[in-house]
Amino acid sequence: MNEEIKVPKVIKTLHIITGLNDGGAEAVLYRLCLNDTESRHCVVSLMDEGKYGPLLRRAGVRVHALGMPRGKCSLRGLCALWRILRAEKPQVVQTWMYHADLIGGVVARLAGIPRVYWGIRNNRIDQCHATSSTPRVARLCARLSRIIPKKIICCSQEAAEAHKALGYRAGKFIVIPNGYDLSRFAPDGDARQKLRVLWGIPPKVPLLGMVARYDSMKDHGNLLDALEKLRRSGHSFQCLLVGTGMEKTNKELCFLLEERQLVESVRLLGQQNNIPQIMNALDVHVLSSSSEAFPNVLAEAMACGTPCVTTDVGDAAFIVGDTGWVVLFKNSQALYEGICQALEAMKDPHAWERRKKLARERIQKNFSLSRMIEKYEEAWRE
């Protein structure tokens, strides 16, 4: 469809997202709204305001929460979305994740808005356990991809290829890697020292960590199995688990720690707001996921000069390059060996400092926030 539409210098962009709790897509949306000066942004959450709603409001971005149940839509919510679209009159609607792609895309087109851009953040539908309806919604989106979105924006090449195979319209894909605020995620020796002293981490004890919510796709069991092997092999270490569900109230997680005799070696910090400081405090960030599209935490850690050990999921290998270690997913032995290689590399201080510097430089070159914003603007103005 060729629309003869004159796109103004400042684009009025309305984002529709499934929810605004802690997550990769939510974080990217937040960074985009805060730093894109070429658009006026408004955000609609199909569910509640979550973590990022108040933060967006504080930054001057209008936020609407429709209160729909998780994984379901309601007539009241659909009517509210219709009214918001008619009142806001955006030039562009950018949706994020499957349910928002479907609901937001259809309602936006019915409201007379032709410039709808879908956002895809997953690379493997079969492992997307957000709700039981998610795979069905994704497949329905594949059918509608010919008529609803103008373009489909993916955060990784692997995600694009996976969705083409599912039946999404191949010619509509644009890959825009995530971008990061490199003034916020940067090496900080003072933060590193303060937090390690606060936690009582001796200078020569390696500090590992994983920043991720408690979710089956993050495969914390794989990480804990690798850490158990590390403990049994006689390595001295501490490990921080940070994110939603990483708390002592998580009985399932605590049982796994006790079963593997890791209670003294693993600290549960829960959800934290000082992620750049935590990344600086770590010696190595470990990601044990069984499925990802574009793991934000790898780029955030590397931007702080923290090398990574990661499973080979999504674009993880592309992010890490030759600055870290990439191993098979769902393989605790491989993850254990990757961590051992990182700990061995730490024994050469000069080489380790060089590796940290290269990790930072790789993110600067490939994944800056300004580059991501520029690519979104190009897509919206096409």
Image (cartoon, rainbow, N blue to C red):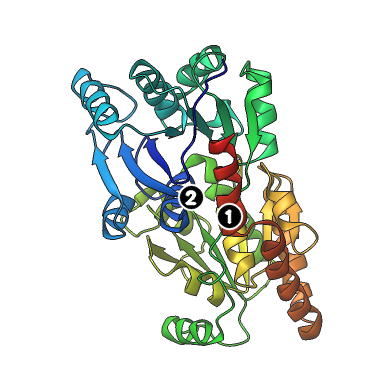
Instruction: Please determine whether, in this image, residue 306 is positioned above or below residue 324.
Output: below
Say which mark, if any, is on residue 323.
none
Task: Identify which residue, 275 or 11, lies in the foreground.
Answer: 11
- Image location of residue 306, percent across then percent down: 64, 70
| Secondary element at image label 1 | loop
Q: Earlier in the sequence, mark 1 or mark 2?
A: 2
Instruction: Please determine whether, in this image, residue 70 is positioned above or below residue 334.
Output: above
- Image location of residue 113, percent across then percent down: 40, 23
Question: At x 29% / y 29%, what residue is drawn?
Answer: 85
Residue with the mark numbered 2: 28
- Image location of residue 186, percent across then percent down: 57, 74
Instruction: Please determine whether, in this image, residue 84 is positioned above or below residue 144.
Output: below
Q: Quadrant of the C terminus?
A: top right
| Secondary element at image label 2 | helix
CB atoms of marks 1 and 2 within 8 Å: yes
- Graded by Cα atoms within 10 Å as few (under 14), some (14 to 19) or many (20 or more), the crowding at tag 1 reads many
Residue 70 is left or right of residue 97, and the answer is left
Q: Amino acid at mark 1?
A: Gly
Say which mark, if any, is on residue 179.
1
Question: At x 22% / y 33%, what residue is drawn?
Answer: 67
- Graded by Cα atoms within 10 Å as few (under 14), some (14 to 19) or many (20 or more), the crowding at tag 2 reads some
Question: At x 49% / y 82%, what residue is drawn?
Answer: 191
